[in-house]
Image: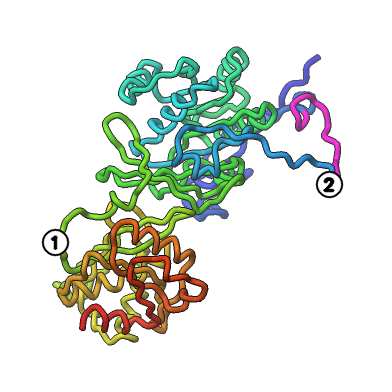
């Protein structure tokens, strides 16, 4: 006689996924109010629980010296930007989560991945769109693949039935919030459904060595929707971001068990899909020949890729009592710190000025080497003196006004020289071990903020 699964009811926080035996007004984990929802949980009986390898067999403990260290070959996605962010391609058996705002291009990116993998059988499962809608998007992308199978499904049991019949090499799920399994008596998108469906997909991926790509929604705060445990279960979390008013999209890795989290991929949204941007420096710099005040160029690095970005600043007299501080694409707290350094260490009075800062192209920059370009853009706008367009900067600013060294300075100089810049200002401490004779660009070594001012604004 089959043992019936035990049923119980529990309360889950819809924000962080913490479980409680009773309703709680304020979540003790994340602090959200009125976020607990009652859900029916079905616990499988011991006879239904399979072993860690899916066959009911127990794994045998091994010495670390006996474990094979041979790395399995990765799946080439035929997308250089995605390969770079993933660390070289799709790892067999990996579970990848792609998150982003609605309409940013997550489904387009996932469909392009599926259609580009012509040498592998790909199963694209959509819980949000019909097969006809996906076909229309495929026609817009102008790509076809006989090995790409499309199915519109939300039931986990039916999905695994399709997987058994087609034996795909790669699976794409769009999106994890739309799936539901019969073993959980809760609606799609609930904490328990997301957790159980992800757990089943993770178990399948590890047992069959099949890469699974999940698309996830994000909340209004910019976090991935669903319980926080979802991010811990997957192997890689990719954040697809960008302003819908701009054409550029950034793919960042916030978690990667098989590669670096500092890499970044850049795409350009076009009418026929996402185009890879192999040289972002040329696109992120304005093509205007006229030199304008408040504009500087910085040599930055994201991951292993150097590129030049344009920093724009506007300084004006405060119309109201309290001056405004606004930043787009740059940390506002760091901007306030740099303005304080300018006032304390360099003697520039900006406490009564409105300061607006913008990173051109709608991208976000975390590289501290952009500090020098930021303060020079602010001073250029404040004095209304333009900086020559053939000059670029790279340096981190300390609280005492010193210019601190930055990493991989030779790659930054090479990128500036390649794009036709004539001069570059770098920290003096970066000169150790740097062979300046191999560069044709003029290199200024500076150690204090005041030295840069005297050279440019004298």
Range of the magenta residues?
51-63
Q: Are marks 2 and 1 in contact (CB under 8 Å)?
A: no
Badge 1: few (under 14), some or many (20 or more) residues near its Cα, within 10 Å? Answer: few
Q: Position of residue 39 (x, y in %)?
A: 57, 34
User: Which sits in the foreground, 157 or 343?
Assistant: 343
Q: Nearer the viewer, residue 434 or 23?
A: 434
Query: Helix or strand or loop: what does disc 1 sit on?
Result: loop
Return the mark for residue 326.
none
Point out residue 359 in the picture as x, y percentages from the top left corner.
Answer: 29, 58
Please indicate whether residue 161 sits to the left or right of residue 395 in the image. Answer: right
Q: Residue at x 53, y 42 (%)?
A: 86
Mark 2 and mark 1 lie on one chain; the one further toward the N terminus is 2
Q: Quadrant of the N terminus?
A: top right
Quarter location, residue 398: bottom left
Q: Where is residue 58 shown, x and y percent of the image?
A: 83, 32
Q: Residue furthest top?
A: 165
Above or below: residue 113 compared with residue 86 = above
Q: Is residue 54 magenta?
A: yes
**Can you say whether 100 is above or below 317 in the image?**
above
Q: Is the C terminus in the top left, top right, bottom left or bottom right quadrant?
A: bottom left
Q: Is residue 151 above or below residue 57?
A: above
Q: Judge whether residue 251 can be spotted in this image.
A: yes
Q: Is residue 93 above or below residue 427?
A: above
* Residue 363 lies in the magenta-colored region: no
- The residue singled out by tag 2 in the image is 65
Disc 2 crowd rating (10 Å Cα; few below 14, some 14-19, many 20+) is few
The number of callouts visible is 2
Task: Indicate how the structure is coloured in the image.
Answer: rainbow
Residue 90 in the figure: left or right of residue 276: right
Circle number at residue 290: 1
Q: What residue lies at 82% left-to-right and 28% top-to-bottom?
A: 57
Magenta stretch mostly in which secondary structure?
loop
């Amino acid at each position: 006689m089959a043992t019936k699964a035990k049923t119980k009811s529990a309360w889950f926080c819809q924000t962080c996924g913490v479980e409680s035996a009773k309703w709680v007004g304020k979540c003790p984990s994340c602090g959200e109010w009125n976020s607990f929802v009652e859900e029916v949980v079905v616990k499988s009986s011991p006879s239904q629980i399979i072993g860690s390898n899916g066959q009911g067999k127990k794994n045998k403990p091994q010495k670390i010296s006996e474990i094979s260290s041979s790395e399995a070959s990765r799946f080439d996605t035929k997308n250089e930007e995605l390969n770079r962010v993933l660390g070289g391609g799709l790892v067999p058996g990996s579970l990848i989560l792609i998150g982003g705002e609605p309409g940013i291009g997550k489904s387009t990116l996932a469909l392009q991945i599926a259609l580009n993998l012509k040498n592998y059988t790909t199963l694209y499962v959509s819980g949000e769109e019909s097969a006809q809608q996906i076909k229309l998007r495929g026609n817009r992308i102008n790509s076809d693949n006989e090995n790409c199978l499309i199915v519109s499904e939300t039931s986990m049991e039916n999905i695994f039935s399709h997987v058994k019949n087609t034996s795909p090499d790669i699976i794409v799920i769009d999106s994890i919030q739309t799936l539901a399994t019969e073993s959980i008596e809760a609606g799609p998108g609930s904490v328990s459904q997301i957790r159980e469906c992800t757990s089943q997909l993770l178990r399948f991926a590890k047992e069959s060595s099949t890469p699974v790509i999940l698309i996830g929604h994000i909340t209004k705060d910019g976090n991935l929707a669903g319980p926080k445990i979802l991010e811990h279960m997957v192997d890689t979390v990719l954040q697809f971001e960008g302003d819908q008013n701009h054409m550029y999209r950034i793919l960042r890795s916030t978690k990667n068990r098989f590669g670096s989290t500092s890499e970044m991929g850049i795409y350009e949204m076009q009418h026929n899909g996402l185009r890879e941007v192999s040289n972002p420096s040329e696109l992120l710099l304005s093509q205007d020949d006229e030199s304008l005040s408040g504009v500087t160029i910085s040599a930055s690095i994201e991951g292993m890729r150097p590129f030049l970005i344009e920093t724009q600043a506007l300084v004006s007299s405060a119309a109201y009592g309290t001056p405004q501080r606004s930043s787009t694409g740059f940390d506002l707290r760091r901007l306030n710190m740099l303005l304080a350094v300018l006032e304390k260490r360099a003697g520039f009075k900006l406490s009564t000025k409105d300061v607006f800062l913008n990173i051109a192209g709608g991208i976000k920059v975390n590289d501290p080497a952009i500090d020098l370009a930021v303060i020079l853009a602010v001073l250029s706008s404040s004095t209304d003196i333009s900086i020559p367009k053939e000059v670029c900067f790279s340096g981190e600013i300390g609280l005492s006004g010193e210019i601190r060294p930055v990493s991989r300075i030779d790659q930054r100089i090479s990128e500036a020289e390649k794009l036709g810049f004539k001069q570059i200002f770098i920290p003096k401490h970066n000169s150790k071990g740097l062979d300046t004779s191999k560069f044709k660009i003029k290199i200024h070594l500076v150690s204090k903020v005041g030295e840069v001012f005297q050279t440019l604004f004298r």
